[in-house]
Amino acid sequence: MSIVFLSRPRRYASPLDRNGGAVSKPPSASKSKLKQKKIPGLRLSEDLRISDPKDGNTDATAKSDAGADKAVEKDPAPQEAKKKDSAPQEVKKKDSAAPEIKADSAPQEAKKNSAPKVEKKEPKLRAEPYFRRKQPQPAKDSDQQGSGAGVADVESPDPKTVNKTSDRSPPASRSGGGDRMGATIEAKANEPMLRSNSGGGDGKGPPQTFHKRTPPEDFQKTLRTSLRAIYRNLSFVLVLTCATNILILAIPIYLFQISDRVLTSRSLDTLIMLTTIVAGAVIFQSAFDAVRRFMLMRTAVEVAARLGAPILSAAAHASLHGTGREYQTLGDLQQVRGFLVSGTLISFLDVPFAPLFILMIFLVHPQLGTIVIVTALVLMVIAFVNQRMTAKPFAEANKAQSMANMHLDSMSRNSQIINALAMIPEAVRIWGRDTAQSLTWQVRAQDRNVIFAAISRAVRLLTQICILGWGAFLALQGEITGGMVIAASIIAGRAFAPIEGSIEGWNGFLLTRAAYGRINQLLSNSALQFEKLRLPRPEGRLDVERLLYVPGGTKRVVLNGISFSLNPGETLAIIGNSGAGKTTLGKTLVGSILPTSGSVRLDLMDIRNWDPRQFGESIGYLPQDVQLFPGTIKDNIGRMRDDATDEQIHDAAVLADVHNMIATLPQGYETVVAADGSPLSGGQKQRIALARAFFGNPRMVVLDEPNSNLDVAGDKALSRAIEQAKESKITVVVITQKPTLLNVVDKIMLLTDGRVALFGHREQVLQQLNAPRGNQPGIQKQ
Ligand SMILES: Nc1ncnc2c1ncn2[C@@H]1O[C@H](COP(=O)(O)OP(=O)(O)OP(=O)(O)O)[C@@H](O)[C@H]1O
């Protein structure tokens, strides 16, 4: 049996983005292609290396592209040229303009003719981002996309798209209707910001041509499917259980027949026939029993494989607004899985056949049947009392155990601090306290459980003795035969076994039921499951309206009526004293906390209504407390995505101005970062995280104190990165306590006690801040 963990389906900006519309390519193929690309490490072609913004050498670019040459020549300032080097918009425009297409403003016909040439030059496309940066694309190109044949081939901003489209589409089809339409949509969906007008909803932005519904994240459906799989398998197991329980009667019937028929008739033939039949029955019974256990084991594995990924996704999402215990729902899945393979479930399945056995004893003699029924009732009472007596201690044991696990988790994350401050005894004591408490409750619960299990076992054995004794008495009275007595005793034992097994496993059943309840609750309540409209790529317009944030369970107003707007490409610095609410505001902007009231809108759409995956891909976030994932630097910059291309990773590093820093590391982009961030320094970690924020050409980036660990050089690199982002029309919000960044932003907001004290253009706010009682026009005061 092959086990496949069903992860959330990867969503691209649109299937059209990657596949070129109607001409689709199996994802596996594209993935393997990407893998191939990544194996040797981050590959920079000669062109890429030459045109690194730091070395300022544009020769290679000039050799490769006359159009780019012109752009460089026209460029008055070398610094400007460097900036353009890193601008993702122009990367994309150039990407679409293959080397053969020298005049961007050439008529559409020229572009049609050039489409086949793109295919010929395909190997060069990896190097094209740099050419593109040298050659700004006139805005009218984008306006022509809708009518131009093969427009996506020459204008698609995504190098991969160009590659793939040209890979798969013959020239004729690329200039034809259906494909062209798909390609045009693709180009528009990914169209970079060329105009700095306002957001998509005001009619001034580029035409937004499609709305595409993505399949919903229906976790409940996954749960239902898993339940159906369980029920389907269990119904088959039930059939096998039925056969097993019937075949199990073979032995008592055999004993009865031998004692009452063979021994009296002295018939050897009967003995051989009976023995053969019962041997066959026993073999079949054993085989059926084994098959049902196999099936239960596979059912458990299937459930774990089906639900693992949805539970982890839902837990990760819910943990934002929860207690952090949501991840323990994965432990609940283990509980459910364990129960499915436990003997308790087998006992539960066997219990319905107990009445059949009791009926057979009744048929032997009603008095023996009555003894068995009374015993079964006594066993049920014992089970009920046992459950009542052990429920609380087991619950307390689990609670303490999960606390101990939390401490353990925290210890593993803070191992450096614990070692440095010699806190190991304290950490062990705290963990030990909870563990000891859990063990104490467990011992208490298990003591009671063992006592009740012993009582029920004694009752069962006594009942069997009782049946033998009373049966012998009835035999003496001549009411039944000796064979019947032995058969009744064996059947009684079979009837009690599942009842006893159920009693012993009752607590496990309760725990499993509670665990399933938590899984059900998590998956049912997960916001991820609701269908979201997949919107066109945002431009980066940000509108914040009357934002109020009062953390749950407190009355403290952390953010109070904050409103402001930023146009695409504008940069804002949020300043203020410690505790003013800057970080909280940054978190609300990226949706990692939800405001109590008010709204944050990206391109006029409330961020709660964005498809979470699309929103995440459209923004970048550098938190105050930088954490990197265990993996290489390129994995971290590429947000751990399998489909992150080398170009995207390199572009992000260049945009964040960290490429040169990475180049100084012995393993460069392949440097492996541990969970604690080593071997990187604090500042290096921060700069890698900055590149991660800029990965994928986001439209809005929030940087929370991005220079808190940076030296002067790092500070300058950060300022350059923000300027490059501004040129790329990326809306940047930077939270800072240092004045150095204020020189590169457009606007400044001063937060005081969760309120906007000042908001306006940089010079005006700076004047206001410097003037003791200034009251400059244009500054918003709240
Ligand atoms: N979940 C929460 N529960 C209670 N109080 C909170 C919560 N989140 C934030 N606060 C409070 O809100 C205030 C603002 O916190 P925030 O982290 O946004 O400040 P800041 O301006 O970023 O400060 P700093 O510059 O020191 O990082 C703080 O007083 C903090 O205690």
Image (tube, rainbow, N blue to C red):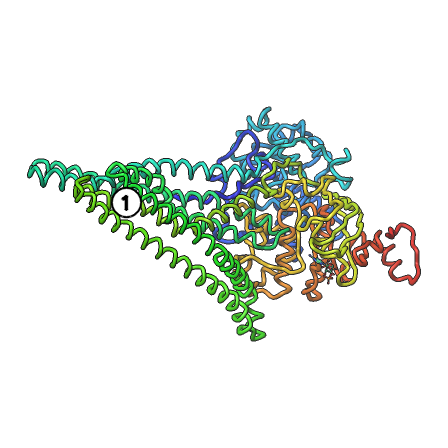
Q: Quadrant of the N terminus?
A: top left
Q: Is residue 780 above or below residue 444?
A: above
For the residue labelled by badge 1, is the local secondary structure a helix, a strand or a loop?
helix
Query: Residue 168 placed where, x, y %?
Result: 51, 33
Q: On the picture, is 752 further left or further right than 430?
A: right
Does any atom of ligand 1 lie closer than 8 Å to the CB of label 1? no
| Residue most extreme to the bottom | 422
Q: Amino acid at mark 1?
A: Ala
Classify residue 219 by image quadrant. Answer: top right
Q: On the picture, is 477 further left or further right than 306?
A: left
Answer yes or no: is residue 376 visible.
Answer: yes
Q: On the picture, is 93 further left or further right than 491?
A: right
User: Viewer-proximal residue, 575 or 448?
Assistant: 448
Answer yes or no: is residue 674 visible.
Answer: no
| Residue found 58% across the figure and 74% down from its top | 421
Question: How many labels, in total?
Answer: 1
Query: Residue 349 placed where, x, y %?
Result: 36, 41
User: Viewer-proximal residue, 124 or 738?
Assistant: 738
| Residue found 30% across the figure and 40% down from its top | 358
User: Viewer-proximal residue, 475 or 341?
Assistant: 475
CA neighbours of label 1 inside 10 A, class few (<14), some (14 to 19), many (20+): many
The residue beneath circle 1 is 492
Q: Is residue 484 above or below residue 713?
A: above
Query: Residue 614 placed where, x, y %?
Result: 63, 42
Query: Residue 437 placed where, x, y %?
Result: 50, 65
User: Viewer-proximal residue, 730 or 512?
Assistant: 512
| Residue found 58% across the figure and 46% down from its top | 127
| Residue most extreme to the front | 477
Q: Quadrant of ligand 1?
A: bottom right
